[in-house]
Amino acid sequence: MNYPNGRKEVQKHFPAKNKPTSSGYGNRGMSLEDDIMATNDYYLQAKMAVVHKKPTPVQIVNVDYPKRSAAVIKEAYFKQASTTDFNGVYRGLYVDFEAKETRNKNSFPLSNIHQHQIDHMKAVLQHGGVCFLIIKFTPLEEIYFLEGTKLFTFWDDQFQGGRKSIPYSYICEEGHLIPFHFQARVNYASVLDKLYF
Amino acid sequence: MNYPNGRKEVQKHFPAKNKPTSSGYGNRGMSLEDDIMATNDYYLQAKMAVVHKKPTPVQIVNVDYPKRSAAVIKEAYFKQASTTDFNGVYRGLYVDFEAKETRNKNSFPLSNIHQHQIDHMKAVLQHGGVCFLIIKFTPLEEIYFLEGTKLFTFWDDQFQGGRKSIPYSYICEEGHLIPFHFQARVNYASVLDKLYF
């Protein structure tokens, strides 16, 4: 059997990108991504926001069309995403964000982010959208909201001899701790309310 | 050989949904979707907008991880999308739309749209986003922009004994002909300018 946990489970545990991130995902139950998707479902049901995760981009090479049943993709490859993972609309704002977990306690490694994601976020900002990063420090069980502009500063500095990570202390002070809410487990909308409304 | 035209070509000609639409895609060169993606690329380069097509959602069942090469998806299935195909930000507006071609000349069949897409578009509208349909009447080579609210009227009416399609004449009068632009081949932003700015 190739899918002992059922199809849904198998899908869940794929890395969103071609290669697993250095941070990795442990077996701590719900991943950050799962928690954000549950939050988005709650926001949708509660008529608070419409935010979705984009599907994992896949390059399809070969498909079989059997008679009387669904098409089966027989050969495909993971593609690099050209944008961030989540976007949507909240109180009239276009919102766009990436979510990352790290096992580090002292800093968030910039290697978790790609140049094209930075380019995308900068473009979004230029057009009046809001972009940010949701960072989970898994050993601390703390989740932070970091505005795009603050990420960009560190990102750009690394090419001028700056450090390759964002210190935890900076994220604590300049980011925003995302509160846990029973239904909105990663209640990022509360930070958006504070910052933009 | 399973991919005589190269991988990119193979990907292009898959239906976005499980089953091919009744309208189908002919061999007229660029499809509406291709033209809109080229338009979005132009908007991005020209710093006019950030709009992307969402990847085709795929349910992955079995993946092979060969040594020293990329992971190969060996079994996967097309999933129904829960949203529309395109979204992004234009002049601070959250924009969200679906694009459909029809071979009909006299009307646009509502069977091209799904209930969950209507639900999604209604939710987007409630949160201050803009949603619309881009309809191409391929025999006429005409492309129209139809606001979500006008689509909803016909959609909801069909369950009250109303017609199952939107007349071409209605779309001509109440929709907006999308002009062709050398670089922005489906220049929908010009309609957004007219309607919202």
Image (cartoon, coloured by chain):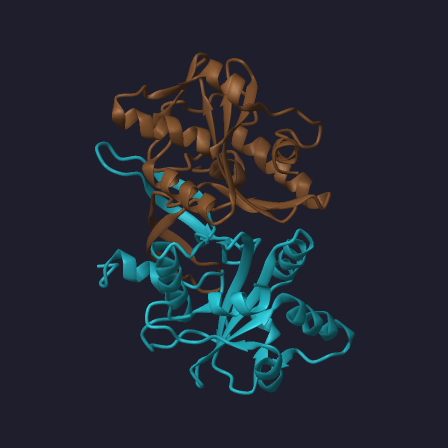
Chain colours: A brown, B cyan
Q: Residue at x 33, y 37 (%)?
A: A115
Q: Residue at x 44, y 41 (%)?
A: A84
In the image, taking residue A118 as reference, residue B94 lies left or right, namely right
Q: Residue at x 53, y 24 (%)?
A: A175
> Where in the figure is residue A163, as x and y percent of width and height?
32, 19
Quarter of the figure with the N terminus of chain B: bottom left
Query: What is the quadrant of residue B119 in the picture?
Result: bottom right
**Of B180 and B35, the residue lying toward us:** B180
Name above or below for residue B196 compared with residue B145. above
Name above or below for residue B118 compared with residue A153. below
**Of B39 and A74, the residue lying toward us:** B39
Tag count: 0
The answer to whether residue A21 is visible is no
Q: Among all residues in the image, which is located at the extreme front?
A: B197
Query: What is the quadrant of residue B95 in the picture?
Result: bottom right
**Of A57 and A49, the residue lying toward us:** A49
Quarter of the figure with the C terminus of chain B: bottom right
The answer to whether residue B83 is visible is yes
> Where in the figure is residue B63, as x and y percent of width and height?
37, 39
In the image, taking residue B159 as reference, residue B139 lies left or right, namely left
> Where in the figure is residue B154, as x and y percent of width and height?
68, 74
Q: Residue at x 35, y 60 (%)?
A: B42
In the image, taking residue B81 as reference, residue A113 lies left or right, namely left
**Of A97 and B156, the residue lying toward us:** A97
> Where in the figure is residue B187, as x and y percent of width and height?
43, 69
Q: Among all residues in the image, which is located at the extreme right?
A: B160
